[in-house]
Amino acid sequence: MENEDEQDERRNETTETGVEWPLQDSFGYEGVSMTTRVNVTARIQRIYWRSIEINDGNRSSASSLTVSIIENARILNKEKRMSLCCLVQGFSSVCCEVRLREDILLNRTDWQDVLCHSQGTVLSFSKLRLVERRNRKRARQLFGLIDSLKTTSSKKQQSCFVFTFDDQSTVEHVSEDKVSDYPEYSSPERLNDLNSATAIDSRRVSFCGKLLYARFTNDKYYNTKHVRLWLSGKCIAHHCLESDVTLEPTISVIQVSYSSGRTVEWDASTLLAGQLLSIQDVVFDRVNPAILTADIFSKIQVIVLQSSPTDESAQNIHEIWHRTMTTTMTDEECTCLKSLPVAGLPTLNENCRVDCLVMLEGVISGVDHENAFCWYSCFHCSSEDISEISNSISQYHCNACALEFNSPVTNIHLEVYLESTSTSTFMVKVKLLQKTIRNLLSGSEKTNSETYNVNSVLNKYLGPMHCHIAEKMQDKNSQISFKLEELDSSSWNTVPMIGLANE
């Protein structure tokens, strides 16, 4: 048997040179500890972002993986960082997770080259640091993703090793002619038609469509962001190219929740109405087929043309972020997806529910004066962070773009009540878009205080327009009332019509 010095020498050797993965599915694997460096050659099946808890204390050099995990769990100085994670699959079809911190991602040129190839390629990692082994009980979502991979063997994987890519690690792309023994890339299953898919089990699917509306909310207590996306499409552009497939456009609602902390996150400036989006590994549940749920393992990407891979919402983003936030389609596929008509929205009625998109038209019968107000913004960058200045030719200074000017943009918050034959049994209040308000007030005279008389909008016809149901209320007399928000449907090739009631 080896003495202690020989064991220590062998452990130091594996730490410096790295042992080959896959490791045995056991904590008792001889020679493996939290200081072990591991070499991994595997195919990237998925790329996603996660908030990872980092220990600031020194890692234990204990010989046993079990002992080192227990010791490192006692370290109290912890913080969370966003990490780009790769779920990779080796020749034995076993999966593991490789984590990469943001600072490494932006500073290491070898990773920048690798991300050009993205998912589906085989990579050779050297000297990854082993950090933990996760089991099904502790990581149900992760194993749900692993189980969804088509190339996974029939026997379910019971544990998943997690590695960290750090300053000592390296990565190289492996040519396809040298990886015949590795599993093929498992593309997510495409959900073809929500209405006819109620018979299938819950599973992860992919969906492509045109973004109609994005609604953002924050949970500051848990440092979590929530986004609801309404997309219209036939689910994937490839179907349009097949003559024997005819699918009616449908609207899908995607619920997205993610932890804040990424340098670049999806927000109102990067998710814009009219964009073509690809949602990968979103969870479909037959119990609630109308709503798809995106978790940390789901990927949201803007679809751009292969011939011109640029996107206005991402043009100022670092190239690395652009690669993780966009995906390409051929010109023919993009044209087909863009040309799909928007799925028909229902006309507002008393049975409509909160968070539905509806059509509405009617005559303005009243104005909510208590919630009517105005404010200024910069005409150049639209920032509201402007200030008045003295001793200058200009009256205002924009603190965002540093521009000085005399004529700011006047923004108005206006909520109006609408009446029509279809809404006679309930009350409807709509929060209007700025461009609709300006059209309504065009030609109206300003008062002495340089504000508009909002009563000038009364008896004007508005619609048809697309709206989101923000609230639905019912009083003690069972009278139903709705509060709606008008949506910008200009990218849907639909423009609201405005005129007098008697026109």
Image: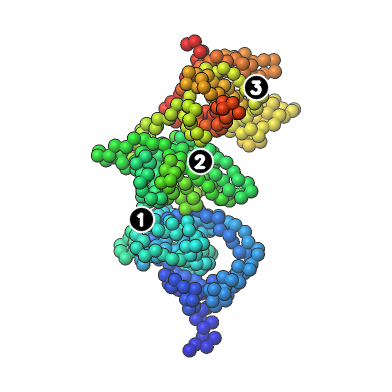
Nearest to the eye among marks 1 and 2: give it: 2
User: Type of residue at label 3?
Assistant: His
Above or below: residue 450 compared with residue 214: above
Q: Nearer the viewer, residue 285 or 16?
A: 285
**In which quarter of the view is residue 70 placed?**
bottom right
How far is disc 1 from disc 2 in space, using C-alphas?
27 Å
How far is disc 1 from disc 3 in space, using C-alphas?
57 Å
Q: In the visual, does 5 lie left or right of 24?
A: right
The residue labelled by disc 2 is 228
Badge 1 vs badge 3, beta-carbon distance below 8 Å: no
How far is disc 3 from disc 2 in space, using C-alphas?
30 Å
Q: Nearer the viewer, residue 268 or 473?
A: 473
User: Type of residue at label 2?
Assistant: Arg
The residue labelled by disc 3 is 369
Report helix, strand or loop for mark 3. helix
Q: Earlier in the sequence, mark 1 or mark 3?
A: 1
Q: Earlier in the sequence, mark 1 or mark 2?
A: 1
Q: Residue 182: x and y, percent?
A: 34, 64
Report helix, strand or loop for mark 2. strand
**In which quarter of the view is residue 479 placed?**
top right
Q: Residue 265: x and y, percent?
A: 54, 46
The residue labelled by disc 1 is 186
